[in-house]
Image (cartoon, rainbow, N blue to C red):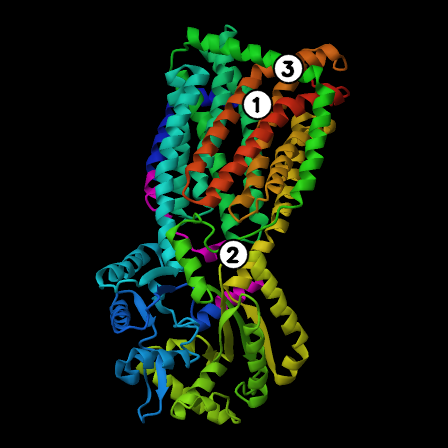
């Protein structure tokens, strides 16, 4: 079916189509009401990799590591009766909170005493004497370094949130309850408190996500209103374009809500992206319509010509933009795959809404091209002609500069590395970041590491030969830089041996018999049960699953540093593989830290593959569109330019790639090719009337008319893209601001590529010289 026929059908059934859009808006509203906000740092490395699948299995067996809130108390005078009373009351009040599964604090920690009472809570040592309690705490490995800092100057109360309360809506009252307890319980003078943990980070982060969304869209609407008014000087055109993009956003939100997608730290930029991208097609449509009116065409003829000439071009730009997003779906990170697919769907939705709604509404309006609008068009055409002359006269110099930028950007881009931190979403001065930094001065940190040990059927893992090797492995982990809080079931057995012998530290060793070791574990389990801390043993030892783990913690040191630690551990496990086979065991590195760093490390490869797929697809599409292989090759040059330019600037300023910012390149490719398509399609159209495709005059005239015809729209869309992405700089998240900076750089690069580099390439290489477009 010819495009002209489709356009005629569109206007014939315009009332039905408008009614259909209105009905879909009602349905989309219902879906949008189900849209939720939520995020957890673990989502960054959710994937189908074997490491992540194994990690999920470990979480099922031993419990999750992301459910704990660390309440950090520190003071120069910590061991006083007043501070200890506050600590005891705090542990009791936190334990009573709805949604709290367990509280592990110093006061309830088990201690062995030699007065005949056996194992008692620390609060019962020395009849509450602070100095006696301090000495006892510092002599107990299960307390010292875990619940009391190495120098005795800080306490740590670990609050485990119930698994069923980890959804954002259920988690908010639990976290708020923890802070309410801290506000309610009178605190001794000089005692400082910090609260850190994934649950707290999730609540704070999601709250700011909501605030950002309530900020972005209103500002975008206001800013775009003034920019569109400056471009068109027509309130009807401005209102129509804003309505079209807002309707597109409603449809996209309805789809996301209906499919259960949640707004997180990555896809929170989708509404702004769709808002900015959705306006672009509308600008090209309105600009062409106004040009046709300016040439003397009546309303219907102007609308028909606009739709015939631009529907296909807008379709191609939308498809290529969607391909840029969808290329992320070939990666292994689930959060990026979902972002890419939903963003691609949103772009296509915006295209359909724009090409249907804008022409149909214009068909109901009286065509008015006011004096100010005509004046604006004349000024734009004048500057377009001057720019065309400049690029033609300096075409060789422009190509040399472009080549220099490409080579320099590629060299500088090699400096860019991937980095990810647990609290990277928060500003450096955020109270949560400051609290975590202070916590890491006294305790290991909150990023989990573990070596998971499984054993063959018939193997006794508590046998002295096996336990001796596992003890050596634990000591190896303790010796690693930045690793702390290393704990294994064998440490618990050794401590139970001390408990059983009246607190005599000389018995802090493993027994020489597996049966006795199991007896000690049973003894310890009873003691922990009395103190309400039985989960400590279950989080390390599950004999029914033939699994145990040696767990440790690191600070928020970044994915590169964590990867370095993981490499050391992997190398040790590989070197011990023969020993492990002889003992009938298998040791495997796991934990949120190493699994997350491995996932982030694979981002570069995933991004490279997605960009190659997108480039190949776009190149294959451009060949039939331009009917020239040479033209298709030329078209890819300005599309590579903004990507390399952005990468080079990031390398020059030492910027790292993070999970949310790495999507800049896929987005940039899709956006860069949009204006390239509009320019080349219009160039072919203008070139058809030239008698000699090989002459300078033919190419120069075609380039000048292309600048006058579509240059204004390309510049306008670039200004709007830059304006829209500038709004992201207002975000409270540093990584979202970095994404905004990256998008600004790529928009500028794409504009330079399409208005300077592309026409220079056309002028020098004449890609249409041998294959003349047929006259239409």
Say which residue label 2 marks. 45
Q: Residue at x 40, y 15 (%)?
A: 234
Dominant SS in magenta? helix
How far across and how far down the image is residue 675, in percent? Answer: 58, 26
Residue 444 to residue 108: above or below: above
**Residue at mark 1 to residue at mark 3: CA–CA distance:** 33 Å
Which corner quadrant holds the N terminus?
top right
Local SS, label 3: helix
Q: Is residue 53 visible?
A: yes
Frontmost residue, 76 versus 59: 76
Frontmost residue, 255 versus 287: 287
Q: Residues within 10 Å of mark 1 (few under 14, many from 20)?
A: few
Local SS, label 2: helix
Q: Nearer the viewer, mark 1 or mark 3?
A: 3
Q: Residue at x 60, y 69 (%)?
A: 569
- Residue 2 badge: 1
Residue 69 to residue 573: above or below: above
Q: Residues within 10 Å of mark 3 (few under 14, many from 20)?
A: many
**Residue at mark 2 to residue at mark 1: CA–CA distance:** 47 Å
Q: Is residue 369 visible?
A: no
Frontmost residue, 583 versus 624: 583
The reply to whether discs 2 and 1 touch (Cβ–Cβ < 8 Å) is no
Q: Residue at x 61, y 47 (%)?
A: 607
Q: Tell me where the magenta segment starts and ends, as one range.
A: 28-57
**Residue at mark 2 to residue at mark 3: CA–CA distance:** 48 Å
Say which residue label 3 marks. 388
Q: Residue at x 46, y 33 (%)?
A: 726
């Amino acid at each position: 079916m010819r495009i002209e026929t489709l356009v005629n059908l569109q206007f014939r059934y315009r009332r039905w189509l408008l009614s259909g859009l209105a009905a879909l808006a009602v349905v989309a509203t219902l879906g949008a009401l189900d849209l939720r906000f939520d995020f957890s740092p673990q989502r960054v490395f959710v994937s189908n990799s074997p490491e992540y699948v194994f990690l999920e299995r470990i979480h099922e067996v031993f419990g999750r590591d992301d459910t704990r809130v660390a309440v950090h108390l520190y003071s120069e005078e910590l061991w006083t009766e007043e501070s200890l009373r506050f600590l005891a009351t705090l542990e009791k009040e936190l334990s009573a909170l709805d949604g709290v599964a367990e509280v592990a604090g110093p006061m309830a920690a088990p201690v062995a005493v030699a007065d005949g009472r056996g194992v008692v809570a620390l609060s019962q040592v020395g009849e509450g004497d602070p100095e006696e309690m301090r000495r006892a705490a510092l002599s107990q490995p299960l307390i010292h370094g875990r619940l009391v800092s190495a120098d005795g100057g800080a306490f740590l109360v670990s609050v485990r949130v119930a698994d069923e309360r980890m959804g954002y809506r259920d988690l908010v009252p639990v976290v708020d309850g923890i802070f309410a307890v801290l506000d309610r319980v009178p605190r001794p003078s000089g005692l400082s408190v910090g609260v850190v943990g994934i649950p707290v980070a999730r609540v704070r982060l999601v709250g700011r996500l909501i605030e950002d969304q309530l900020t972005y869209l209103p500002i975008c609407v206001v800013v775009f209103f003034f920019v569109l008014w400056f471009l068109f000087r027509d309130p009807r055109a401005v209102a129509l374009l804003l309505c079209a993009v807002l309707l597109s956003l409603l449809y996209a939100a309805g789809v996301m809500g209906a499919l259960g997608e949640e707004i997180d730290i990555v896809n929170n930029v989708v509404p702004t992206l769709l808002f900015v991208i959705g306006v672009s097609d509308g600008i090209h449509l309105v600009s062409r319509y106004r040009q046709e009116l300016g040439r003397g065409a009546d309303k219907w003829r102007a609308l028909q010509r606009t739709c015939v000439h631009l529907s296909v071009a807008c379709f191609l730009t939308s498809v290529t933009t969607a391909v840029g997003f969808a290329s992320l779906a070939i990666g292994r990170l689930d959060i990026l795959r979902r972002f890419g697919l939903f963003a691609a769907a949103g772009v296509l939705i915006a295209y359909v809404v724009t090409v249907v709604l804008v022409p149909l509404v214009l068909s109901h309006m009286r065509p008015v091209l006011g004096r100010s609008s005509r004046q604006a068009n004349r000024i734009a055409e004048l500057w377009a002609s001057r720019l065309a002359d400049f690029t033609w006269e300096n075409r060789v110099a422009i190509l040399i500069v472009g080549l220099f930028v490409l080579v320099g950007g590629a060299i500088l881009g090699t400096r860019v590395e991937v980095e990810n931190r647990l609290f990277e979403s928060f500003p450096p001065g955020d109270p949560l970041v400051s609290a975590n930094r202070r916590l890491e001065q006294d305790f290991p940190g909150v990023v989990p590491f573990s070596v998971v040990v499984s054993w063959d059927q018939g193997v006794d893992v508590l046998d002295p030969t096996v336990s001796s090797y596992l003890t050596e492995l634990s000591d190896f982990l303790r010796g690693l830089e930045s690793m702390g809080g290393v704990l294994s079931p064998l440490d618990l057995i050794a401590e139970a041996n001390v408990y059983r012998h009246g607190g005599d530290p000389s018995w802090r060793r493993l027994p020489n018999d597996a049966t006795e070791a199991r007896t000690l574990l049973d003894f310890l389990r009873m003691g922990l049960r009395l103190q309400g801390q039985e989960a400590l043993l279950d989080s390390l030892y599950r004999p029914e699953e033939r699994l145990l783990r040696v767990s440790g913690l690191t600070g928020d040191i970044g994915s590169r540093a964590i990867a370095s630690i993981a490499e050391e551990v992997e190398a040790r496990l590989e070197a011990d593989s023969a020993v492990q086979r002889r003992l009938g065991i298998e040791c495997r590195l796991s934990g949120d830290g190493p699994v997350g760093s491995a996932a982030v490390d694979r981002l570069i490869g995933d991004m490279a593959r997605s960009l190659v797929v997108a480039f190949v697809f776009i190149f294959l599409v451009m060949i039939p569109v331009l009917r020239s292989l040479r033209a298709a090759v030329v078209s890819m040059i300005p599309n590579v330019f903004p990507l390399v330019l952005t990468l080079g600037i990031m390398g020059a300023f030492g910027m790292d790639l993070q999970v949310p910012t790495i999507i800049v390149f896929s987005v940039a490719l899709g956006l860069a090719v949009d204006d390239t398509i509009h320019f080349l399609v219009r160039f072919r159209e203008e070139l058809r009337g030239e008698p000699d495709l090989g002459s300078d005059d033919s190419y120069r005239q075609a380039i000048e008319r292309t600048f006058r015809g579509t240059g204004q729209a390309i510049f306008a869309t670039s200004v709007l893209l830059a304006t829209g992405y500038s709004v992201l700089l207002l975000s409270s998240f540093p990584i979202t601001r970095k994404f905004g900076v990256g998008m600004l750089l790529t928009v500028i690069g794409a504009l330079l590529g399409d208005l300077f580099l592309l026409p220079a390439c056309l002028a020098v290489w004449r890609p249409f010289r041998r294959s003349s477009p047929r006259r239409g």
